[in-house]
Image: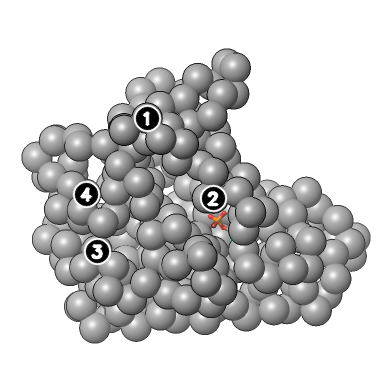
Amino acid sequence: MILLKLGGSIITNKERPLSPRTKTIDSIAKKLRKIKEPIIIVHGGGSFGHYWSVKYDMHTKPAKYNYHGVAVVKNSMVELNKMILDNFAKNRLNPYCLPPTDFMSGNKPIISKIKEIRKIAESNLVPISYGDALWYGQKKSYILSGDRIMSILAKILRPRLSIFVLNVDGLYSDFKTKSLIYDMKGNQASIHDIPMDVTGGMKRKVEEASTIANMGLKVFFVNGNKPQRIVDAIQKNKFEGTVFRG
Ligand code: IP8
């Protein structure tokens, strides 16, 4: 089984509020059609969820955030999710809409529901979940990032490969010193992620990827602008990007 996160920076234009990258979504979906293995998709918020989360000052820490903010963040994620679902259906990928409320109670995963996701993926449906604003309890809410969903699902489902699809080629990082992250050319890759990102952008991604790798699972960061690389990693064991091993 494959677990694949479509980062907000690849499926939306993070420079412009509420703007999907429709052609990129379509070219990734077309490549995913070639994959015969069960696959579960998670997507990020990009210029949809993050745009509103920043406006309403909402974060991953549970707190009494503005309820109108909760509503608009959720609505924007449904809107972005619908675009992915429509595109996947058009490309005959049988998407199965899976809001995180289907398998989360507060900030706790519902194990039986997560195990069910495997069955869904094995039945030729493609479960598609996403980062979202979630109810926490005691009048509090929080932002659950798609990256966090990746490690929650990986822990229970133990996918053969977890892939993070990015808008850059790869990265180098020193986890111990928490130094900046660089792409393959040595440029800072995380900088443009910061202003519009309430879940920590590239830093969070690397943390969740190392959590997954530390479970003894393989993690791969790949550039979604070169979607054939996703197929090559899955089908040919050819990794053009960054691989994390536990
Ligand atoms: O883009 C967070 O998901 P991420 C989504 O995976 C929201 O961090 C609602 C901001």
For disc 3, the marked residue is 28
Label whose residue precedes the other's in the sequence (4 or 3): 3
Q: Position of residue 223 (x, y in %)?
A: 29, 48
Dot 2 crowding, Cα within 10 Å, few <14, some 14–19, many 20+: some
Residue 230 got which mark? 4
Tell me if label 3 and label 2 are in contact, CB under 8 Å: no
For disc 2, the marked residue is 193
| Quadrant of the rendered image containing residue 162 | top left
> Whole-Å distance between the Cαs marked 4 and 1?
22 Å
Dot 4 crowding, Cα within 10 Å, few <14, some 14–19, many 20+: many
Left or right, 238 with respect to 86, comes to: left
For disc 1, the marked residue is 186
Ligand 1 image-quadrant field = bottom right
Kind of residue at badge 1: Gly
Could you tell me which residue is drawn at 77 percent across and 73 percent down?
69
Label whose residue precedes the other's in the sequence (4 or 1): 1
Which sits in the foreground, 79 or 135? Answer: 79
Q: Is residue 203 above or below residue 59?
A: above
Kind of residue at badge 3: Ile
